[in-house]
Each structure stands twice: as C-alpha cells, then as structure tokens.
Image: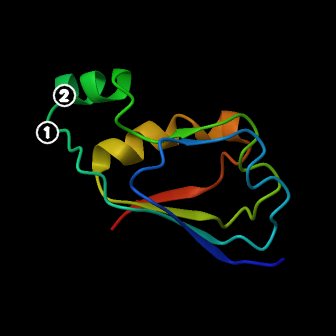
C-alpha cells in the first residue's frame, strides 16, 4: 500500500514505535486540531506533562521521506514535536503550524 498523506485524529495521543517505518512515500502528516492550547511557557510545561500533546514512539518515522511535513495547529505543539523527531527517526522532518 502506498500513501502520501496521513491524518491523525484528535483522540490519538501516541504514535507507536515503528508505526510509519519504511513509508518512503509518506510526504505529509496532518495532526487534527487538539483543544489544548498553551499561551505561556508555564502552560506548555503543564500540558506536556499532562500528555496533552501527541507523542511519537521510537523509530515511528524511520525511513520516511526527508521532505516529510507535519502540520499541527499550535506553536506549543510544534515545539513539543520538534523535540521528539530525532528519537522518532526523522530529524529532518519539518513541523509547520497551519
């Protein structure tokens, strides 16, 4: 099966290890709008600890395209995902706020 984009629903809290491993044709991941928004660094820390943001499992993006774009709804979520990209296996992926 070849797919170029994936939408992760707002009820998904974690992408398990090896979920998209080897999906070289995957170009875009859309993460649906979460109702969680952080307006300050303090709120960001609280939300991150309460698992309000999606978590990427080990090697979940390994083998995906180096031009992979992950589209999120907030700057705080972008920051949380950027920290996880190396562990997920694609540190060159771009995270954009829509």
Report x, y in % for residue 61.
72, 50
Q: Quadrant of the N terminus?
A: bottom right
Secondary structure at numbered mark 1: loop
**Splitting the image into 4 quarters, where does residue 37 fall?**
top left
Q: Single out the residue that lies furthest toward the front.
A: 11
What label sits on residue 24 in the rendered view? none
Report x, y in % for residue 58.
72, 34
Instruction: Name the residue rendered at 68%, 78% in the picture.
Output: 4
Q: Single out the residue that lies furthest toward the left.
A: 39
Instruction: Name the residue rendered at 14%, 39% in the picture.
Output: 39
Total number of numbered labels? 2
- Looking at the image, residue 36 sits to the left or right of residue 48; the answer is left
**Splitting the image into 4 quarters, where does residue 93 fall?**
bottom right
Q: Residues within 10 Å of mark 2 (few under 14, many from 20)?
A: few
Instruction: Name the residue rendered at 42%, 37% in the picture.
Output: 80
Secondary structure at numbered mark 2: helix
Q: Is residue 91 above or below residue 44?
A: below
- Report the colour scheme: rainbow
Instruction: Name the residue rendered at 54%, 58% in the picture.
Output: 94
- Looking at the image, residue 78 sits to the left or right of residue 28; the answer is left
Residue ID for mark 2: 43
Residue ID for mark 1: 39
Report x, y in % for residue 81.
48, 42
Q: Quadrant of the C terminus?
A: bottom left
Please name whichever residue, 98 or 17, is drawn nearer the observer in this view of the structure: 17
Q: Residues within 10 Å of mark 1 (few under 14, many from 20)?
A: few
Q: Is residue 42 above or below residue 82?
A: above
- Looking at the image, residue 45 sits to the left or right of residue 89; the answer is left
């Amino acid at each position: 099966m070849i797919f170029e984009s994936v939408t992760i629903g707002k009820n998904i809290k974690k992408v398990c290890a090896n979920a998209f491993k080897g999906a070289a044709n995957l170009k875009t991941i859309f993460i649906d709008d979460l109702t969680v928004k952080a307006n300050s660094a303090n709120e960001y820390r609280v939300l991150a600890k309460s698992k309000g943001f999606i978590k990427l499992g080990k090697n979940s993006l390994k083998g995906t395209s180096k031009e992979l774009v992950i589209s999120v709804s907030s700057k705080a979520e972008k920051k949380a995902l950027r920290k996880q990209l190396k562990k997920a296996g694609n540190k060159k992926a771009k995270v954009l706020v829509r």
